[in-house]
Image: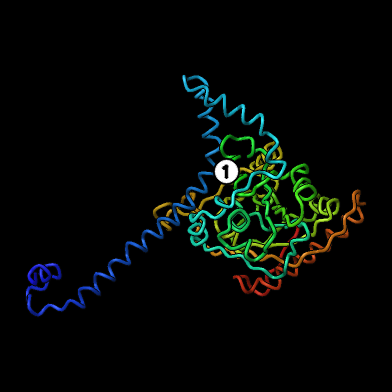
Amino acid sequence: MKTIIAAYSKDLRGSRLSLRPLLRSISAASTIPQHHLRTFLQLFSVLQWIFSFLVMGLMFLVVFIYLFFTYLWPISALYVSWLVLDWDKPETGGRRSLWVRNWPIWNYFRDYFPIQLVKTHNLPPGRNYIIGSHPHGILCIGAFCNFVTESTGFSQKFPGVRPYLATLAGNFRLPILREYMMSGGLCPVNRKSIGYVLSQNGRGNAVVIVVGGASESLSCQPGVTTLILSRRRGFVKLALENGADLVPSFSFGENDLYQQINFSEGSLLRAAQCKFQKLFGFAPCFFYGRALTSCQSKGFIPYSHPITTVIGEPVTVPQIKDPSAETVDLYHELYKRSLLKLFHEHKTKYGLAEGTELRIL
């Protein structure tokens, strides 16, 4: 037995072998695979998220169309029948699943960057809310992690409040993807859907709107703190119509996850991007991150950079069924002030210089 142990430790002296150093070396070696496994799971969680929201819907659309021309056509027929019956479900509260929101994979997704959620004020569950999410970034990763999963503890920080992240309505017309999105608590970003959540779904609802939208993503760059907000008043009007308080939130680090090739204002390519965005609701950004196997190579995986989403002080909003333009402007200004206060109070804590200003267009 001593000879076998000595051979393993490359010590040919046999009788002089000490088991303690050997066990210590084996214990140290066993931590290396665990570290690699954790890194792999973090990368896999990000990869599956990118696949889910950029590829899955179109892939299943192609699959179901193909099945119509095979002997498996009843599968497609049954799903289309289900779609017809369930067509309006995304706009009437959806079908959220606490099981999906608590999947362990979201913890690895959170830890890859990492992402954290910071609470500065209470959100009493007896009210409804519209949370403005800033900035858009390229893929709204901070907003997704904080409001569609429980990995950063939204329900523990704001007990009794149910978040609904609003996104493009067209995503809910794609097979399977619509079911997946509803299970996380996403809803279409349109008047019907938001109005239902805020007026016919009881209290304790928080609709999260990425106010800058696709237009803001076109100017996304590391270190850039420019928001599109000045002419975005629709969310304020919805808040007034439904008596929902306005809550600003800012994700520090969101713009640092990708590098984007920006085209100058007035250029032909920038005009083409804007035209595409108006037609289809999203902008074709030309961006890159890191490769799957190397941080030094370019690829489609976001860079591992911390994101901290800070939720600020609510602006109390009365219910006015038909608010005047002046009233909308007043609460829009109050919201903007609350957002600026939030930004300046926390910017130095999360990587920005004291002199950094938040530019609002």
Q: Position of residue 143 (x, y in %)?
A: 63, 56
Taking the image as shown, residue 85 lies to the left or right of residue 235, namely left
Q: Residue at x 32, y 61 (%)?
A: 33
Q: Secondary structure at mark 1?
A: helix
Q: Residue at x 29, y 71 (%)?
A: 28
Q: Residue at x 64, y 44 (%)?
A: 95
Viewer-nearest residue: 126 or 56: 126
Quarter of the image where the N terminus is located: bottom left
Q: Position of residue 125 (x, y in %)?
A: 74, 61
Q: Is residue 85 above or below residue 206?
A: above
Residue 153 position by quadrant: bottom right
Kind of residue at disc 1: Tyr
Residue 335 position by quadrant: bottom right
Which residue is disc 1 drawn over? 180
Q: Position of residue 238 (x, y in %)?
A: 82, 50
Please tell me how many numbered marks the rendered image carries.
1
Colouring convention used in this rendered image of the protein? rainbow
Q: Is residue 289 above or below residue 13?
A: above
Taking the image as shown, residue 16 lies to the left or right of residue 253, namely left
